[in-house]
Image: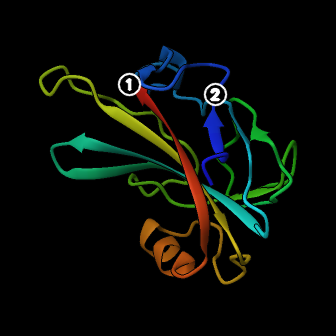
Amino acid sequence: MADFRLVSPAFEHDRPLPSRFVGEDEGVSPPLQWSGVPAGAKELLIVCDDPDTETGVVTHWIVFGIAPDAEGLPEGLSRDAYIEDPIELVQGLNEFDEVGYIGPEPDDERGPHRIFFRISALDAELTQLSPGATRNELRAAIKGHLLGGAELVGIA
């Protein structure tokens, strides 16, 4: 699983997120690319979290239903629960009870925030999850189905 990698053509690991991916600016979803999907994967999912907030971990994005042969997500996906083009996927609810990506809005008092983009490969399809699923529903659904994962960290 060391070969499973997640990168972005828009920013480097552990480097600042460009302002267009931050809530204060455009707040659009970043482009992501991956390689080395584990054999036997039936579905991919992506979760974007910020663990550096006063209130604990804040989820900015949940994406699931991604085909295992997909190679990435384009920049600026719509905030629709179900997307068919340019890639078929389903989006869940973020911490703000909205579907789709919401960029981080770090406060200067707490300093920089690490924004984790995590991709997971599953040995099953999440057919029981509906569009707009929550982080807790996702966690319950993937239990026992994880084949591997990779992460990319941006700083906001």
- Which residue lies at the image location 63% right of the left edge and 55% below the top edge? 1
> Which residue is painted at 66% across and 84% down in the image?
128
Residue 113: x, y in percent? 29, 30
Q: Is residue 105 above or below residue 2?
A: above
Q: Residue at x 86, y 54 (%)?
A: 69
Q: Is residue 127 visible?
A: yes
Assess disc 2: are there few (<14), some (14-19) or many (≥20) residues with their C-alpha within 10 Å of its C-alpha. Answer: many
Label 2 – label 1 distance at C-alpha: 13 Å
Q: Which residue is mark 2?
A: 8
Residue 88 location (% of width, % of height): 83, 55
* Residue 114 location (% of width, % of height): 34, 33
Q: Is residue 125 above or below residue 54?
A: below
Identify which amino acid the numbered label 2 is placed on: Ser
As displayed, is residue 117 above or below residue 1?
Answer: above
Residue located beneath label 1 in the image: 155
Q: Is residue 1 or residue 138 the one in the foreground?
A: 1
Tell me which corner region of the image, top left, top right, bottom left or bottom right, holds residue 91.
bottom right
Circle 2: element type: loop
In which quadrant of the rendered image does the C terminus lie? top left
- Amino acid type, residue under disc 1 in the picture: Ile
Instruction: Name the residue: 18% across, 19% down.
Output: 108
Choose top left, top right, bottom left or bottom right for residue 20. Answer: top right
Q: Is residue 116 left or right of residue 65?
A: left
Image-based side of 70 in relation to 61, left or right: right
Residue 29 appears at what percent x and percent y?
60, 34
Earlier in the chain: of badge 2 and badge 1, it is: 2
Q: Residues within 10 Å of mark 1 (few under 14, many from 20)?
A: many
Instruction: Using the image, determine if residue 87 lies above or below residue 126.
Output: above
